[in-house]
């Protein structure tokens, strides 16, 4: 409940401030503030989704969602990133038009909004930093980015106030928008990796296979598949060859898999006399020989 409450407070702060700074951008005629309002609106959406998923993720798996509801958070990430991407493109287009046709900016108003921006986002980052859920850590990181973004706007506003180099405003807004787009691309790559069932980057398949082969009475392991549902919870399926008592071998392997953040595993046991039905296997097939070495097909 504390995690959900913290995320909800951060959402209210962020949404209120994004509306406030949107009108502030219109008032000061600053594209840098307008670009950050778009960013903050995207953050408010991501926080809202994080809040919904924090509640939804508590639901147990059922006959329709056999893996539970974890992947809803990935879908939420796609929606949030698309909103940020479209908003950033809009901001870049507006900033370019401002470079071509400069507009007089209210520097004093811009400085005031920047100070409020740093303060509000710092409070939101502080609140969300207290939790330990992955959702909340993600939200906290977003808030920290916003604090840094507003520090840049504040410094730029002060410089323009004393130099009157107004072109700095659209240049800053383009930099902020490009920074957002860069992070959107990084996040979308992670999402695609999850949907394409790519092996999680923290899992070394060679080491995992070697660890399984080191378990007493394991003669071979093949058809290994490791994937993630939401980027945090990993799942595994594999075929293990053993002639020993099955439950003890299975229990030891399941215990070993925990260090790879594998929360659920399906292990099919085969005897040395059994021929695997999957002839065309696209992962390495490890077998233990009398000489003690591993052999890979």
Image (cartoon, rainbow, N blue to C red):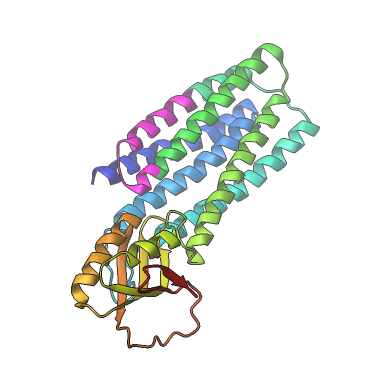
Among the 4 quarters of the image, the one containing residue 95: top right
Q: Foreground residue, 234 or 155?
A: 234
Q: Which residue range is magenta in the image?
A: 116-137
Vertical comparison of 245 with 44: above or below: below
Left of 188 or right of it: where is 143? left
Left of 249 or right of it: where is 90? right
Q: Foreground residue, 281 or 80?
A: 281
Estimate the x, y position of residue 243 in percent, counting from the top left.
25, 80
Estimate the x, y position of residue 248 in percent, counting from the top left.
19, 71
Left of 104 or right of it: where is 128? left
Vertical comparison of 32 with 220: above or below: above
Among the 4 quarters of the image, the one containing residue 152: top right
Q: Residue at x 56, y 29 (%)?
A: 24
Among the 4 quarters of the image, the one containing residue 217: bottom left
Is 172 in the magenta? Answer: no
Vertical comparison of 70 with 132: above or below: below
Left of 142 or right of it: where is 211? left
Q: Foreground residue, 292 or 203?
A: 292
């Amino acid at each position: 409940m504390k995690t959900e409450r913290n995320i909800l407070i951060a959402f209210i702060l962020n949404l209120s401030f994004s509306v406030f700074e949107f009108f502030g951008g219109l008032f000061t005629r600053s594209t840098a503030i307008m670009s950050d309002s778009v960013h903050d609106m995207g953050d408010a959406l991501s926080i809202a989704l994080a809040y919904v998923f924090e509640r939804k993720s508590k639901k147990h798996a059922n006959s329709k969602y056999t893996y539970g509801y974890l992947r809803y958070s990935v879908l939420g990430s796609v929606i949030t990133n698309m909103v940020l991407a479209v908003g950033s493109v809009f901001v870049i287009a507006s900033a370019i038009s401002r470079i071509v046709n400069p507009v007089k900016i209210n520097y004093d108003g811009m400085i005031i909004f920047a100070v409020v921006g740093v303060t509000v986002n710092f409070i939101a980052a502080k609140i969300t930093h207290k939790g330990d859920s992955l959702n909340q850590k993600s939200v906290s990181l977003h808030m920290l980015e916003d604090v840094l973004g507003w520090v840049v706007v504040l410094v730029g506003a002060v410089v323009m106030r004393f130099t009157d180099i107004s072109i700095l405003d659209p240049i800053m807004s383009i930099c902020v928008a490009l920074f957002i787009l860069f992070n959107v691309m990084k996040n979308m790559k992670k999402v695609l990796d999850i949907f394409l069932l790519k092996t999680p980057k923290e899992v070394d398949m060679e080491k995992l296979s070697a660890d399984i082969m080191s378990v007493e009475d394991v003669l071979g392991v093949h058809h290994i598949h490791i994937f993630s549902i939401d980027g945090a919870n990993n799942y595994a399926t594999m075929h293990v060859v053993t002639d020993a008592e099955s439950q003890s071998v299975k229990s030891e392997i399941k215990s070993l898999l925990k260090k790879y953040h594998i929360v659920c595993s399906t292990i099919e046991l085969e005897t040395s006399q059994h021929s695997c039905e999957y002839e065309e296997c696209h992962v390495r097939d490890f077998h233990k020989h009398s000489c003690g070495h591993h052999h890979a097909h």
